[in-house]
Every structure is written in C-alpha cells, then in structure tokens.
Image: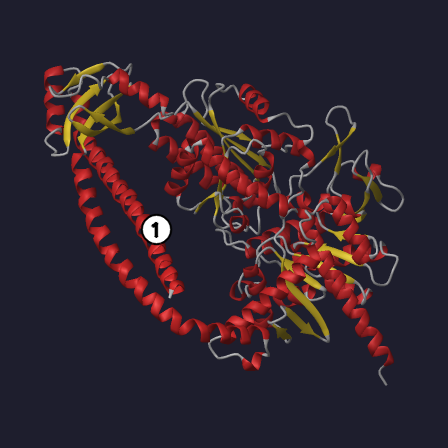
Amino acid sequence: MLRNISTFLGFLVSLGLLAWAGLALLTGTTRGWFERDLELRTALAVDAARAGLVARWDEPDLLEKRLLDLTRDERIMAAAACTPDGTTHSSTEVFPTVLSCETLFSRRRADGELGSWARQIDLPSGPARVSLTPLLLSSGGEGAVALVHDTSYVERREKTARNILVAVFGFLVLGAAAITVISGKVARRDWTRDLRRALLGPASLAGDEFKPLLRDVRALAQTLAEERERDGKNARWSAERLRSTLTEHLHGERIVLLANREPYVHQFAAGTGAVEVLHPASGLVTALEPVMRACSGVWVAHGSGSADRSVVDSHDRVAVPPGEESYQIRRVWLTEEEENGYYYGLSNEGLWPLCHLADARPTFRAEDWENYVLVNQRFSDAVCDEVDVDDPIILVQDYHFALAPKMIRERLPRATILVFWHIPWPNAERIGICPWREELIAGLLGASILGFHTKQHCNNFTDSVDAFMETRIDREHQAIVQGGRRTLVRPYPISIEWPVRWLEHTPPVASCRETIRRELGLAPDCLLGVGVDRLDYTKGIEERLSAVDALLEDSPHLRGKFTFVQLAAPSRTKIARYQQLNDRVTALAAQINERWGDGAYRPIVLLRSHHEPAEVFRFYRACDLCYVSSLHDGMNLVAKEFVAAREDEEGVLILSEFTGAARDLTEAIVVNPYDIKQASAAMALALRMPVSEQKLRMKSMRRLVSEFNVYRWAGRMLVDAAELRRKERTFGRLAAVRP
C-alpha cells in the first residue's frame, strides 16, 4: 500500500514539474511573440513614416507632427527623433524626460549594438519597451527614431494564459497520474519478463514486437565492441598511436601512397635561381602528409616543380620533409601532352565537373582518355617498382587514378589496396554520362577497400555498380564481389592532424589580429571575414562575395567597419573555365569595392596567390568569421583547419550545407550558399554573436575535430585493412589444404 502511494506521489511530483516547465516555456514563448510583435510594429511604423521624417527633418514643427502620427498606433505611447550625435531633435509631448536620446545611445553602445536596438524598461507609469531604429538622413548622416511602447497588456495576457494553463495541467496531472499508476501496475510485470527473455534468450523466443529492438540492440552492442577494440578505450589518436597501430596490426609494414599532387614542390626562385620548397594548397596534402610522416614509406606523385628534377636521386626519389626526412617522394615525369590530356583534360574537365553538382558541363575527349589510361599505367608501374614484397599495403588517392587499383592488382594480386575517393561520387544516372563509366568502376573494384567521405557517396557508388556492372552486391556487409574478389565500400570521413604542426610557431590570436589588420591597412577594431580556397568554381567564391555585397547593402552600419579577405590560390590555369572564373571574381570584387568602398576602405581584399599553411593559419586566427561556401564538396578541410586554429575558442564558422564537413561540424552556422540573402544574414548574425555563444559552439567543434582527426581516419582504414589481410591469409591457408 505504502509502495503504491509513493509511486502515485512520485508521478504527481513528476507531472507537477512538467507542468511548471510547460508554464515557463509558455511564458517565455508568449513573451517572445509579444516582443517580435513589437519589433514588427516598430519596423512597419518607421518604414511607413521614413520618407516623411527624412523630408521634414529640418522643420521641427512638421517633424513633431510626423512623430505624433506614429503614436496613433495604440501600443506606441511616445516618439522622438535623435540626431547622429545623440541629441533629441524633436519629440512628442509625453515622451519621458528620463529617456533622452543621449541616454538611449549610451545604452545601445553598452549593449554592443550598432543598428536597431530595443530594451524593456520600467517607467513610473508602468512597464514599457523603448527602441531605437536607424534613419539614414538626406545629408548622409545616420539619425534614429526612438519609440516607447506600452507593454502593460503583455503582463495581463500572460497572467490570463498562466491561470488557464495551471488549471488545465492540474486536471491532466491528476488524471494522468491515476491512469499511469493503474495501467503500469498491470502491464509492467509481464512486459519486463518478456523483454528480459528476448534480450537474454534465443532470438526464437522473442515476441514479434521485440524482434526489431533485439536486432538493433545486438547490432549496436557488436558495433560498440568493435569500435572499442579498434580505437582503444579513452585513447585519442595521434601520430604515435598511428605508428604503434601500424606496428601492432600490420607489423610495421612500409606503405606506398599514390597521389597526383606531391606534398612538397621544389621550385627555382625568381631572380636568384635558388631552390625553394613549397607546400601546395590541397586538402588531400593537408590530410595525408601527417599520415606519411607518422607511417613512413614512399609517396608516388607527379613531379611538377621547376626544380623537382634537380633534387632527386638516380631513382627519382627525394627524402622529405626538409630537415626531418621521415619518408620519400618518388616522382613520375609527364610530357606536356600527357599532362594536358590526363590531368587538365579527363581529370579536371571531365571527372571533376561530373562528380560535382555545380554549373559546369563535363567535357569528354577520346584523346584525353587515351592519355588517362597511359598515365595511370605509368604510375601503377612506378608503385609496383617501389614495393619489395608480394602483398604490400598501397594507398591510392582520388579521381586521377581510378584505373590504377585494377592495374596494380594485375601485377600484385595479393596486395592490400586501399582507395580513397576525395570528391563526391554522383548518383548512377549522372555517372552514366561518362563514356568510360564501366572502365572507371572496374578500375576502382580492383581495390581491397574503397573509401568515401559519407555514407551517401558509398550508396551512390554501389548503385552505380548495380546499374552498369555484372557483380554480386552484399549490401549487409557493404561489399561488392566480382570474379571471386571482394571490395569493401566504407565511409571514412577525412580530417586534419591534431594538434596542427603549423600552429607551433604561429603567433597568438591577439597578435595575429593586430598584425593582419595593420598589414591590410585596417582599423584595429575592424571586423574581419576570411575565405580560403583554390580558385575553383565548385567553391562558391562568386556567391560568397555576393553575400558580402548583400550584407553591406542590408547593414549600412557595417560599411567601413567590415572587410572580407579572400585567399584564392590559382588553380588549373590552363583550363578556360578557370581563367574565366578568375576574371569574373576579379571583376565582382572590383564592383563591390567601387560600390561600398570609400577612400582607403575596401570591403573586399582579394589575394590571388599561393599562401603557405603558416600564413593561412594567421588569417584563421585573425578573423571574426570564416565562410566556407562550397557548392559541392566531398569534405572541405578548410572548415576543420579554422576550428583547429582557434585556440581562443572564438570566431564563427559559416558552412555550406553541401559539404561533407557540415555533417560533422553541426555547431557551425549552416547555410545554402545559393541563397545569398540567407548567407548575408548568417554573416550579420556571426558578427553580432555574443562571445559566450561563440565559445560554446567552437568548444564543441574543437572537441570533435581533435577526437576524429586524420590519424583516426588513417588508423580506421589501416585496421580494417589488417583485418581483411588476416581473413584473406586464413582463407588462403584453408584453400591450400583443401583436397
């Protein structure tokens, strides 16, 4: 009896707390509605009277009549016109003397606001809401209209709603508590017994209602167990852990990595002829270079630097990084014709626009395909020349080498080949545009493991195989079987190193803010936005600059006080589409600067040159916001680099929803970059976001990037590869003894 009474009282208390929370929520919601209603009334009233106020500004008597017209609204008690210096220019008779324009301007500055401002106050006559709305004068200055709203009706309505809600909740609490206690006592015992039987016993004993739950629970338990075994409990991935993982699971075997872009480029300096080392702007390099430093091995790449041939040995190898020499680059040389056909032609005029949903039509030429096949074979041969065992571990990177996995497999049938596709994989209908779709897919199926950034890209690839190839698809185990060989298709969201080595010698945030603004000729308190990209049409640079244009149009108070810096590294300059993009971006930046610039002030600073990573991180640290506006991107590591750079946990990330990073960095302001107004509103929100909210968002994102770093990405693939090698070797031994 006492137990039932305790249970009943517990329910009463719980539901009572629920009622209290609902009341608080309702009160907050209704008050928010009333405040938004007042804001709308203010905006509508001022907008309707704006022309008349500006026209009568220099005629105080007529101006007072205009202000009196505003008070005809039943909720507006008084109005005043304020000069740009905070003087009360004119007001209605009943405007409170304690609310001078000077006082209101001071309160607005104290709140850190520059535009429209509103606050709730208590007057001797009762509660009221006072607002300031900017008013652009014909003289060019910016005055303001002050309005005092009667809010006593808000408290009356809230009291009425509160009384009704209390009565309704009281009735519901009593009724629900009684029903819950009675029904729970009847059903709890049998339901608990059946659930325990389903979880602990054989699946055949589970009722139909428990079978979906049982399957999900057991799958989750297995997944968690595998993750814990693979990643280690409470252990963060690092370069050291990656090396130990390689030693433990793969016995420290040497890794051969194939990528078109090399991590270090040797160039002859203009004028002096001295050899200088550059670190190319590439998300692929950003992700993989730390992995190679941790694992050692050989990076096979195209030697494109003017001094690349002068520094290699007789086998076309050079040890890197300079001063550390933890791995080697094996350079492969291409003729101009081969480079034009393989790289600029099929790779970047064909496959790149094919895989990115941007406004660009893919171009396919038979001669480009011939060069693509030839170059893939040459690189595959170079990879095979670098291995000294018959079952090496080979990492093939990106769309430049779709044919290489099959070519390598033909020479090294026992090799463990990991392929990672760094860009999106489109749906089957779109991939069907390519004349050589079957050859590309067959080439990728030479891999042991094929990785993409997201599960969606994995599904798209599997659907493409289903549409165009004769294979067996094992969707349960995410595998494709062809000719007796399995290719696992897995999502591996790529990331960056943590901690970032480029930050070791980068000045603190405060120093970067000061020096960057001084170098750009900006005021110390100038707000700064940053974009960092290769000059590519998929990055949405034109849309980004258009959003800045809209921001300055909608927020006049930011003119002269906000500058957006676009770091745009030249890319694929031999392709006409990229040349045209460069011209359009240059013209758009000039147009915006002409429209909103004033004297030395430039709202857009366009820096079209290569910037070393250390320099890029200076800009990350100096800015107030970073806008990543990609129209379509596999991941986009700029977003994660910006997060890693902000040790102060300040700054705001605005991120395109069409990036893979948007699925990870959910605390960013996620926008549709095609929606210029939405993007400009996001920038306005970012510039006025309180520091406390910035820190909450950034702390969450930094925790995610630090935990899910590039070492974890590589470690997951290598551990999966090790598991696959063990299974294949076991199968091979069994096959050898089979009669």
Q: Quadrant of the N terminus?
A: bottom left
Residue 530 position (above or below residue 301): above
CA neighbours of label 1 inside 10 A, class few (<14), some (14 to 19), many (20+): few
In the image shown, does 98 or 336 lie closer to the viewer? Answer: 98
Percent position of residue 506, x then y: 65, 28
Q: Is residue 401 visible?
A: no
Instruction: Residue at 38% x, 60% y: name it.
Output: 6
Residue 406 in the image: above or below residue 539: below
Residue sitting nearer the eye, 651 or 365: 651
Q: Is residue 342 above or below residue 203?
A: above
- Coloring applied to the structure: secondary structure
Describe residue 196's horizontal placement relative to residue 304 as left or right.
left
**Percent x, y for residue 316?**
85, 45
Looking at the rendered structure, the kind of residue marked 1 is Leu
Left or right of residue 651, residue 40 in this image: left
Figure quadrant of residue 686: top left
Residue 548 in sight here:
yes
Q: Quadrant of the C terminus?
A: bottom right
How far across and down, in percent of the image, does residue 525 sit?
A: 47, 21
Q: Residue at x 63, y 30 (%)?
A: 615
Is 565 positioned to the left or the right of 675 in the image?
right
Residue under circle 1? 17
Q: Residue furthest front?
A: 2
Q: Give me the residue at 57% from left, 38% from top.
A: 643
Q: Secondary structure at mark 1?
A: helix
